[in-house]
Amino acid sequence: MLLSCKERSKAEGYCFPIMKPAFCLCLILYFASSVCGAPRPNILYFYVDDLGWGSIGPNGQYERKDQGLPYVLTPNLDRLAKAGVNFRRGYGCTVCSPARSSQQTGFHQGYTFADRNDPDNAKKAIRADDITMGDALAKAGYATGYWGKWGYGGSKDMRSPTIDNVQTLPTSHGYQFVVAELHHVRAHTFFQPTLWNAPAKEGAVGGLELKPNSMAKYVNHEAYPNYPAFQDHQKYPNPAYCDDVYAFACLDFVRNQAMEYKRSGKPFFGLFAAQIPHAPFAEVQKLPNWDHDYKDKPYFAKLSPQSKQWCAMVTRIDAHFGNILQALEDPNGDGDKSDSVAKNTLVVFQSDNGGPSGNNREQLDANGGLLGSKGSIYEGGIRVPTIMRWPHRITGKSKLKAGSNSDLILDCSDLLPTFCELAGASIPPGVSGVSLAPTLSGEGKQRIRGFLIHETNGHASIIQGRYKFIRPKHASNGPNKIKNTRKKHGKDPNKWQLYDLQTDAAEVNNLATEQPQLVRELNQLLTAERVDEPAGFANTYHDWIGNGGQEGLHEASNWTEYQYENAGLTYMKEGGEPQSHWIARIKKGGSALSTKEEEFLSLEVCGMLTVERASKVIARNELRICNGGELKILGGLIESPRWVDNKKDSTLSGFGTIKSSLYNQGKMILTSDQPLVVDGSVHLSGKLAMEDSGNAKEKRKVPIIKGKDIVGEFQNKEVNLGGKTYSIKYARKEVYLVPK
């Protein structure tokens, strides 16, 4: 049975207790469409380690080839870009650990739990409360798989690794099929003798078991391609090259799940997180015929050993991607493509951070002329190659055209909400990422990302539109003392910097002294959007436990405590009041009252919240009314730098001011006495009702909403007020009533 868009929306609610969040999705979502009129897509996510922005054809390697310069071979990624979209402003993080945490949890680097490559990340980077891609899509009825570098939950012992924290494992976060390395340091030895596997035998700790690393199980698969893993399989090393094992495990999954999708309609999600082309590059030389693809390239012999090894790594993983993409076209490998699932499979390719410094960058321009490299907050450290292909939606005639480049700013934190929306699952509360589903599907209005945060070793940057502001750790024109530090990349590391990325992607011309007001504004926003904690934590989850509507929202005692027990960490309430890094939720049946100013990272209203006159509620990432909740504004102020969302089957009522964009899909109950003032765009659907205050008088025009601009309309055309019928009318900045 297929759900209509209207029916499906009723199943989007979820709740999270103080322990593991649970999605309250109906089982019927199993076969539901997420994008109206189309089945939910399969999702295949290719993720590589340390591949610079300029390392693929459309970002500079085509030009190098045309100019007779040395270039890296990525034929399958290049074909992927020609059939999809190359997002030229795709971003990861400065280094791998925060990138993976941001990717999985949907929080930007200023909020994600792992803000750096910290030795303790293995124990705490992804918490029980966090909703990952695996959590969301498994709950939505997807078969889920993960292969490669996970980075969290295991020890780095090379001989006898152990599980250090069950709560951070991929199997604890929705991933059903796993072949992975858990510790990010151990993942940089590409021939480690054992890998963690799931499904595992009954009773295995964390649902994972340690198995020998070998390619032997794949040698006799006649249907599997001979290239690149089996050029000379009799000499193939044992233990095997880890990325080859990951690739063939992914290939197994794709073949099996594609055939299941054709049989039953059950979609699949797979994330292949390659460990390469990360250093040590020389590891690739342990493989037979490791430089096979470059033997006919005269320039190859002139490259440095590092560049040769890096080229071989990149091209080998590209070949694996090609094998897996071919499996989408012909799942059973019989040459008959009638069983193809490629059309309705979204394929995403991305790197975690920019490429490293070294000969590969200098001889092959791996970072595409961008300043900086891995570990830097300059574009060369954070801008990453990003490609998406979805033949069902991205075609030569679609709004987002196949074979095109896009300058839409896209962050790794955007992928979780994007996958959730496409899968028909609720987007987790408070995440920084912005769903790109409207852009990819061509349906609905794309919400615009306000800003991006990156940080490394005390340095921080914020990107807003075309501009990027960088605040050094020791700023000579900031509040901190000057620390003498040598120049890097020709830049004074103590100076505030401002760049116009639209005209100066290489970050050559510092505009900070020319635009001091913009610098001040971006610095203030950067300060507000980072949680600078010694323990490295960002957000914490809290549920309302107050008794009735007379209990103040500002009293910390009315909220649950937060404790992350497995990492030996407890984050207690501070200052007797909620904190700005809280992800707060008023549960269904709960009732809270706001009488003063309170600030949260996000606030989800599933019960009742009343905001009285002279009070102010700030929710930095979002304020969401959902699951039948009601937000009642009695002259108070609601503020969010992003948006206020009134979801279907929920209610926004009263009068006052919303300093944000407003998206209404539910019910609005307004008053004729005073309009609702919105300091942002107003996006309307859902239904309108009017509250009869007893003072209703027949007027020729009754203003009920004032906004920056009005988009869309309510579903109903008229309302009843004071026993009379009024028609709903729309102007560019106003919604008003006229008597019928």
Image (tube, rainbow, N blue to C red):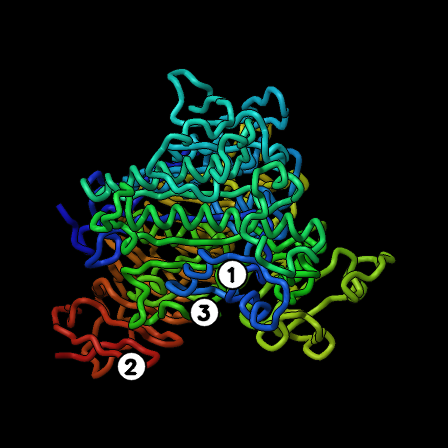
Who's the residue at 16% across and 79% down the image?
A: 739
- Asked whether residue 39 is in view, the answer is yes
**Residue 651 location in percent, x, y?**
28, 55
Residue 187 tag number = none
* Rendering quarter of residue 25: top left
Instruction: Name the N-terminal-most of marks 1 and 2.
Output: 1
The local secondary structure at tag 3 comes to strand
Q: Nearer the viewer, mark 2 or mark 3?
A: 3
- Asked whether residue 559 is in view, the answer is no
The residue carrying mark 1 is 90
Quadrant holding the N terminus = top left
Instruction: Name the N-terminal-most of marks 2 and 3.
Output: 3
**Residue 601 location in percent, x, y?**
50, 51
What is the three-letter code of the residue carrying label 1? Gly
Quadrant holding the C terminus = bottom left
Residue 406 tag number = 3
In this rendered view, identify the residue nearer to me: 532 or 180. Answer: 180
The residue carrying mark 2 is 731
Who's the residue at 54% across and 31% down the image?
A: 235
What is the three-letter code of the residue carrying label 2? Ala
Query: Is 489 left or right of 567, judged from the image as shown?
Result: right
Density class for disc 1 (Cα within 10 Å; few <14, some 14-19, many ≥20) is many
Who's the residue at 50% across and 32% down the image?
A: 168
The local secondary structure at tag 2 comes to loop
Query: Is 377 left or right of 274, judged from the image as shown?
Result: right
